[in-house]
Amino acid sequence: MTPTSAVGTHPPADLSMNETPYPPLPGIRRIVADGAAALQRYPDRTSSALVSALTARLGVGPEGILVGPGSAGLCQHLVQSLGPRPEVVHAALSFEGYPLIIGNAGARAVPVPMDGYGHDLPAMADAVTERTRCVLLCNPNNPTGAALRRDEVRAFLDRIPADVPVIVDEAYREFVTDPDAPDGMELYRAYDNVCVLRTFSKAYGLAALRIGYAVVPPRLTRAAALTGAVFFPNALAQAAAVASLSPDVTPELTRRCTELVAARTRLIGALRGLGVTVAPSEANFVWLPLGEGAVSFADRARAAGILVMALPGAGVRITVGSDEANDRLLAFVRAALAEGL
Ligand SMILES: Cc1ncc(COP(=O)(O)O)c(C=O)c1O
């Protein structure tokens, strides 16, 4: 969403893109600045330093790791390379990028309606046929914030044929606190058709650099890597991602996630305290199922200098921001309720 106005002396509080409110760590900023001295050089085509850092972090051999231009870019490379079957099953309401990615890959989206705020996994398993290229699971789900539970995902995976890859998109994994939500890596180890997508955009705060990674069954790596073999990711992104995995910065990144989760709890509590319906969230955003009121809420918020993401007829997704931005949001909601939200 493009900021259209600022109110008073404040720039707009942009809570529309699920970005972290934290600025880059000083060490990472320095690495990117220093990288400017070598912009004439192509990046390492094999991202060797990053792949080895991920190998060490995840306990997976390099043959199972892909790095690429954000997890959305990697999702595109994967879905494209998994052809030729024509259909991709995903939940609706889920990440708005999926229909675009599926269409770009020359496939047809098979959206399966939600069960409340979450994926309807039994219905998604029913939707898998001999035409299915792959399945996309978003955990936690964007935009509703719901996390899948371990037992339901395993029951789902038990029903999916081994030759149908299931891509588990964990863009928000670092914000999950529910112990019943499975870690994608545990699913990857247990099932031969699971791919896991992760990103440096959210918890690591590198959204502008466009870098993410995927953990995939080794038999699928080569085709996806060839699909994306255009000097992705760039050199600055690789260097920043490697530094972000260093043990030196892990405590600070973990502290930031813990702080953000606490802010999420406070924000949900405060909104509910005002009488607003808020879905439970395991991500860095909250979902207000406002239905037909979604667009007018977002319009009024924008006029008050707060940008949120409205999905017409469904609801509004609001990123958990800085304390100051969250307070501005709460003040807006209080005022809007007083005027009859
Ligand atoms: C579920 C999900 N997957 C992927 C992405 C894209 O992330 P990246 O910046 O890594 O491409 C987003 C971004 O909002 C997302 O919500």
Image (cartoon, grey):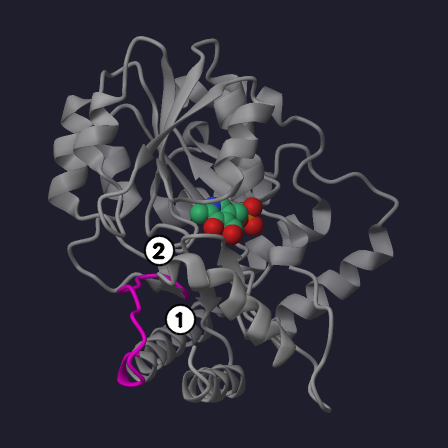
Q: Nearer the viewer, mark 1 or mark 2?
A: 2
Name the residue beneath numbered marker 1. Answer: 257
Q: Is residue 203 left or right of residue 167?
A: right
Q: Amino acid at mark 2?
A: Thr
Number of other residues with Cα within 10 Å of mark 1, as a class: few under 14, some 14 to 19, many 20 or more: many
How far from the left and from the top, in percent, is residue 159?
A: 16, 23
Vertical order, 233 against 28 (above or below): above
| Residue 96 placement (x, y as % from top left) | 50, 43
Residue depicted at x 32% and y 48%: 139
Q: Quadrant of the C terminus?
A: bottom left
Q: Is residue 13 magenta?
A: no
Q: Which residue position holds label 2? A: 144
- The magenta segment is 272-285
Does 108 appear above or below 84?
below
Q: Within the image, what quadrant is residue 77 found in?
A: top right
Q: Is residue 74 left or right of 55 when viewed as pictured?
A: right
Mark 2 nearby-residue class (10 Å; few <14, some 14–19, many ≥20): many
Q: Residue 274: x and y, percent?
A: 31, 85
Task: Look at 26% across and 48% down and name the residue there.
Answer: 118
| Figure check: 315 above or below 50 | below
Toward the front, the furthest residue is: 340
